[in-house]
Amino acid sequence: MIGIDTSPAMIEQARVRAAEAGVELDLREDDMREFELDEPAALIYCPFWALLHLPSWADRRRAFERVAASLQQGGRFAWNTFAFDHRFAALSDGEHKDKPVPHTVRYSVGDNRIDLILDQGGKSSLWWASKNEWLGLIDVAGLCLEALYSGFDGEPFTDDSREYVFVARRPTS
Ligand SMILES: C[S@@+](CC[C@H](N)C(=O)[O-])C[C@H]1O[C@@H](n2cnc3c(N)ncnc32)[C@H](O)[C@@H]1O
């Protein structure tokens, strides 16, 4: 199994945890907008909202195009993201949280961005997207939507869901 991340620190964490779990991983410092595989994959997945670190739709299109080019025919791409909820945003904006590390949450609604501003300095930003933006990315990359769930256990997606778990497929011909 191959894992990529732009962050050497995250690669190192993954290396340590894989060793502890006795799992063999091929970990690479790489960018999801640029990665290439020697062999096409049957499954590519991008969990923990990682696609939301890409700031623009064009960045995501590049990532989806790299995924489509790296999948076997019939291969799957799965990822999860949250669905924007203005009530949750209104409650969270300006909130200070202690876990997993002390930080303050700030929403930029105009830029569809959440900043997690760390007390110790530094910032992590997430840019949310609507369901139709995700469907547009599937379309332009030449993939097909196979399923949309609201959780990794295959929970059905409904009007009340707050999480998207998309599964897209590369067509067989
Ligand atoms: C929520 S963390 C998930 C960490 C880890 N991949 C996992 O699944 O547990 C999101 C990760 O995306 C990485 N990331 C952000 N932009 C990236 C990019 N353009 N290409 C690859 N990884 C990126 C960050 O460095 C961060 O480690």
Image: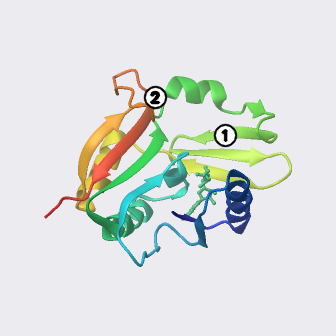
- The residue beneath circle 1 is 106
Are the residues tagged 1 and 2 within 8 Å (C-beta)? no
Q: Residue at x 67, y 65 (%)?
A: 7
Badge 1 density bin: few <14, some 14–19, many ≥20, Cα 10 Å: some
**Of the pair 4 and 126, the residue shown nearer to us:** 4
The image quadrant that residue 40 belongs to is bottom left
Element type at marker 2?
Answer: loop
Picture quarter with ligand 1: bottom right
Q: Amino acid at mark 2?
A: Arg
Q: At which x and y percent is residue 127? A: 52, 49
For residue 128, side relative to residue 89 (left or right): left
Measure the C-alpha gap from mark 1 to mark 2: 19 Å
Q: Is mark 1 within 8 Å of ligand 1?
A: no
Looking at the image, the residue that sits furthest to the front is 22
Q: At which x and y percent is residue 19? A: 71, 59
The image quadrant that residue 18 belongs to is bottom right
Q: Residue at x 57, y 49 (%)?
A: 126
The image quadrant that residue 65 belongs to is bottom left
**Vertical position of residue 114 compared to residue 23: above or below:** above
Q: Is mark 2 within 8 Å of ligand 1?
A: no
- The residue beneath circle 2 is 162
> Which comes sooner in the sequence, label 1 or label 2?
1
Q: Residue at x 36, y 43 (%)?
A: 166
- Of circles 1 and 2, the one toward us is 2
Badge 2 density bin: few <14, some 14–19, many ≥20, Cα 10 Å: some
Instruction: Give the total number of marks visible in the rendering.
Output: 2
**Vertical position of residue 28 compared to residue 24: above or below:** below
Q: Amino acid at mark 1?
A: Arg
For residue 88, side relative to residue 10 (left or right): left
Q: Quadrant of the C terminus?
A: bottom left
Looking at the image, the residue that sits furthest to the left is 173
Q: How is the image coloured?
A: rainbow
